[in-house]
Image (spheres, coloured by chain):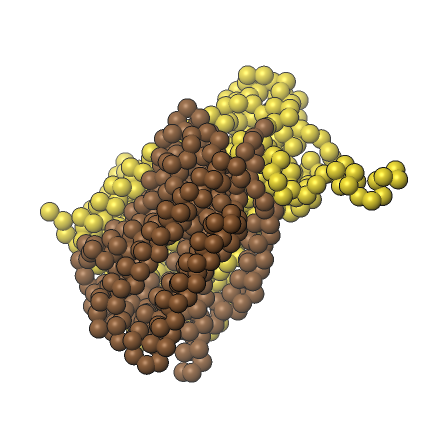
């Protein structure tokens, strides 16, 4: 019933499924942690309770998102060994230390300060609490730094040698490995994506409550903040995305060919394929709608520049075009819609209709999930575009997998799908329910925050009362 | 070569430390999950949950360090062990998903709180049980062919691995009860003490059973423990255990709060050292040594620089976080 090829395909599905699901949560928590730090800083600076209310409101959402990110993340740290044993053995000496640094510099930092961030405001005071929030926010960024360095190394491997056991080992120090050619672009592109994703989610929640009550002060504040973010960062993201694409063209041309749907080479200016039906079997684009020479203009900044197609790549090294072509288009289309939303919000701001333009609010609500979809689409583009390699150009996916029987992988894949949809489906439902309530003045804490636990430092009044000097006062 | 041997041993020690930290720290919060059904719905369960809510995430991070560190420092062992333990490992990961989200979800959905409480218990139990099974599966040996796992995907399942599974569940439960004895008061604390009286002898019996069964798994374990000079250490073990048991019983009788937890930790530490003596210098008994599995010195050295600075720092701020939430957990910790 099963063959080795099935086991490989199932293992790929399982990794893709678990990593895509996982990616949703950090994409939100990276941005949300920073947003919380900003809100708390504004509260400390201005003393306005509005910011504290918003902080507590989003903190409850952050707690749920973060818990889901943690548990889906633990799965990832073991998936390499369970399903990609050969890859782990061979690439471990290079990527393992980077992942160990992620644990040591980021995961512990986040986890160590999360408890204080969630439950410790009463216990440690404002300043120390703000420090804890900052550490969690910084931790999410450091985590992105290391894991994207690992991913980038798999895309554009540099600085390695191969030892007699067939393992990749560092050749000359760690800088060329960590700062491999695609890393700076991928890091900036992904972190901005996380910020945009959060801004769109926050904006949608704000817009939802503005539609119900356009005078709601909390909804106004978060909608305004989110729209500033979208307006300012979406254009930057388009620019960074373009640079990232040019970097990919330089180091992974086959991926760009798949993204562009260029099966054939174009010696005199390549067209931009807007839409089409990729046919991998016959290596041609069907029903293509094209704009002549635009692809050459975008990628080479020259209308007549020649662009090579997949016909220049050995058949066994070609990535599958079908998925990459479409996921890339989904990401780009959503990116331009984000740009449009940002522009509309600027227009609304200029005409003082930011809180009253109902179509803008509806647009913002529709764009609420856009960041998540774009992040997953972009991730699929870059990961499937790397195929048929795990370490681009040097180690094939087919030779990376564990020696597992297909039924074992099929069983675990089914288990992951069932559990993830059930658990994270419920989690998403709880998130939506939290978001459906508008933030209130005197927004309540997390329901399980310890209020008057023993061991807390005595309050000033109590301390003064028990001090020797008090009796003279 | 000498340098790389030292490095490899240092990394073995660091990972052993990470695993031990994980076992005792997630041990008590998994234990609380396992014991959850016997706690009263409402105040008692809420108190038990609140006593670990601020720290469970940090506790579980040691598991990530164990996995990530093994991949980095001993990639060959990581590759072989993880694929050999495929089924119990996947079960453990899914169990940790259930019990991890339960911390948040039970508060978000009071109408279905019993479902998430069940998820918390089932997840904690399966996580502890599979961890014990994996320990047993490793001790009884893993079939290696070349640089890969060479056995079937049910090899881990034996009476011995089931015994270690049950033992770990018992040990975690005892840790959990001791933690609650320390962190709560009133009826919850009394409840924890009653549980400790049952769980302490069960755990002790389980450790004894696993120790004896391990000796008869294969020739090497028996030799290792009863040849000179190891037997000099071996001979002390019953004495140490007897002293610890006496101290535990006394601390329970005198209603000490912290002492039983510390003594249980000592028993865990002793068992852990015993495991180390059984295993060293192997990572996979009788087939893969630490040296064979080691990543190149350049990888281990690069990580050691970070670990030397960061692990003490991590311990410092983790201790601070525990300090912030020190003392008894409030019953009415809600606004």
Q: Position of residue A346 (x, y in %)?
A: 61, 29
Say if B12 sits above or below A364 in the image.
below
Q: Split into 4 quadrants, where in the image is the C terminus of chain A?
A: top right
Is A197 left or right of B216, judged from the image as shown?
Answer: right
Q: Nearer the viewer, residue A232 or B167?
A: B167
Q: Is residue B238 left or right of residue B187?
A: left
- In the rendered image, the residue lying farthest to the right is A472
The chain drawn yellow is chain what? A
Q: Nearer the viewer, residue A425 or A183?
A: A425
Residue nearest the viewer, comparing A25 with B229: B229
Q: Is residue A111 visible?
A: no
Asked if residue A277 shows in the view, the reply is yes
Residue A253, image quadrant: bottom left
- From the top left corner, tell me how far across and down residue A129 is, in percent: 64, 43
Image coordinates for residue B306, horizontal then vertical, percent: 53, 65
Q: Nearer the viewer, residue A41 or B13?
A: B13
Q: Quadrant of residue B325?
A: top right
Residue at image point 47% right, 34% down: B44
Determine whether B296 is above or below B310 in the image.
below
* Apparent side of residue B297 relative to residue A277 in the rendered image (left or right): right
- For the point 33% across and 58% down, the residue is B207
- Residue at the left extreme? A1
Name the residue at 29% across, 56% down.
B164
Q: Residue at x 56, y 36 (%)?
A: B330
Q: Position of residue B55 (x, y in %)?
A: 51, 46
Count of numbered tags: 0
- Chain B on-screen colour: brown
């Amino acid at each position: 019933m099963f063959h080795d090829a099935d086991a490989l395909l199932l293992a790929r599905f399982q990794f893709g499924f678990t990593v895509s699901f996982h990616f949703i949560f950090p994409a939100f928590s990276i941005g949300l942690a920073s947003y919380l730090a900003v809100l708390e800083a504004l509260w400390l600076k201005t003393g306005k309770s509005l910011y504290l209310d918003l902080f507590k409101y989003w903190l409850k959402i952050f707690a749920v998102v973060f818990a889901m990110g943690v548990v889906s993340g633990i799965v990832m740290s073991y998936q390499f060994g369970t399903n990609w044993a050969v890859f782990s053995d061979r690439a471990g000496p290079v990527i393992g230390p980077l992942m160990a640094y992620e644990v040591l510099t980021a995961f512990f930092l986040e986890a160590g300060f999360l408890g204080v961030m969630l439950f410790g405001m009463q216990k440690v005071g404002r300043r120390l609490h703000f420090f804890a929030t900052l550490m969690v926010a910084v931790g999410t960024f450091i985590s992105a730094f290391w894991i994207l360095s690992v991913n980038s190394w798999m895309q554009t491997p540099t600085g390695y040698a191969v030892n007699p056991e067939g393992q990749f080992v560092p050749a000359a120090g760690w800088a060329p490995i960590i700062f491999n050619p695609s890393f700076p672009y991928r890091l900036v592109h992904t972190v901005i994506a996380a910020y945009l994703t959060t801004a769109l989610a926050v904006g949608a929640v704000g817009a939802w409550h503005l539609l119900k009550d356009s005078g709601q002060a909390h909804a106004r504040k978060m909608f305004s903040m989110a729209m500033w973010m979208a307006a300012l960062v979406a254009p930057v993201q388009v620019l960074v995305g373009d640079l990232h694409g040019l970097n990919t063209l330089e180091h992974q041309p086959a991926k760009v060919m798949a993204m562009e749907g260029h099966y054939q080479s174009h010696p005199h200016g390549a067209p931009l394929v807007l839409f089409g039906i990729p046919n991998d079997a016959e290596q041609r684009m069907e029903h293509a709608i094209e704009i002549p020479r635009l692809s050459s203009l975008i990628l080479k900044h020259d209308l007549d520049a020649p662009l090579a197609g997949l016909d220049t790549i050995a058949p066994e090294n070609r990535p599958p075009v079908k998925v990459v072509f479409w996921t890339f288009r989904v990401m780009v289309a959503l990116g331009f819609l984000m740009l449009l939303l940002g522009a509309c919000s600027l227009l609304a701001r200029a005409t003082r209709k930011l809180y009253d333009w109902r179509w803008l609010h509806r647009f913002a609500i529709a764009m609420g999930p856009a960041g998540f979809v774009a992040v997953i689409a972009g991730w699929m583009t870059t990961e499937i575009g790397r195929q048929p390699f795990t370490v681009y150009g040097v180690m094939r996916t087919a030779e990376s997998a564990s020696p597992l029987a297909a039924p074992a992988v099929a069983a675990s894949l089914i288990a992951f799908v069932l559990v993830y949809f059930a658990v994270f489906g419920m989690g998403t439902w709880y998130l939506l329910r939290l978001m459906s309530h508008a933030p209130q003045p005197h927004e309540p804490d997390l329901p399980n925050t310890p209020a008057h636990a023993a061991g807390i430092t005595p309050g000033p009044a109590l301390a003064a009362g028990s001090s020797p000097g008090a009796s003279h006062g | 070569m000498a340098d790389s041997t030292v490095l490899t041993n240092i990394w073995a020690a660091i990972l052993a430390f990470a695993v031990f930290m994980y076992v005792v720290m997630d041990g008590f919060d998994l234990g609380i999950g396992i014991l959850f059904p016997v706690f009263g719905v409402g105040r008692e369960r809420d108190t038990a949950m609140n006593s670990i809510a601020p720290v469970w995430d940090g506790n579980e991070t040691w598991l990530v360090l164990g996995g990530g560190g093994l991949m980095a420092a001993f990639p060959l062992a990581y590759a072989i062990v993880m694929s050999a333990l495929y089924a119990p490992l996947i079960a453990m990961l899914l169990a940790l998903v259930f019990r991890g989200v339960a911390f948040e979800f039970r508060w978000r959905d009071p109408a279905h709180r019993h479902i998430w409480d069940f998820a918390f218990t089932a997840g904690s139990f399966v996580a502890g049980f599979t961890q014990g099974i994996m320990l047993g599966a490793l001790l009884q040996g893993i079939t290696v062919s070349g640089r890969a796992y060479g056995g079937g995907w049910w090899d881990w399942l034996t009476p011995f691995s089931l015994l270690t599974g049950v033992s770990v569940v018992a040990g975690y439960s005892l840790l959990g009860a001791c933690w609650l004895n320390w962190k709560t008061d009133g009826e919850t604390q009394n409840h924890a003490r009653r549980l400790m009286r049952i769980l302490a002898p069960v755990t002790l019996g389980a450790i004894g059973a696993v120790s004896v069964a391990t000796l008869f798994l294969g020739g090497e374990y028996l030799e290792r423990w009863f040849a000179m000079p190891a037997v000099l250490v071996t001979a002390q073990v019953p004495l140490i255990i007897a002293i610890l048991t006496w101290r535990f019983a006394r601390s329970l009788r005198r209603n000490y709060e912290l002492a039983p937890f510390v003594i249980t930790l000592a028993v865990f530490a002793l068992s852990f050292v015993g495991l180390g003596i059984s295993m060293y210098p192997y990572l996979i008994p009788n087939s893969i040594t630490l040296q064979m599995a080691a990543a190149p010195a350049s990888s281990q050295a690069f990580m050691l620089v970070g670990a030397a600075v960061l692990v003490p720092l991590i311990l410092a701020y983790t201790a601070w976080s525990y300090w912030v939430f020190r003392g008894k957990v409030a019953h009415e910790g809600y606004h």
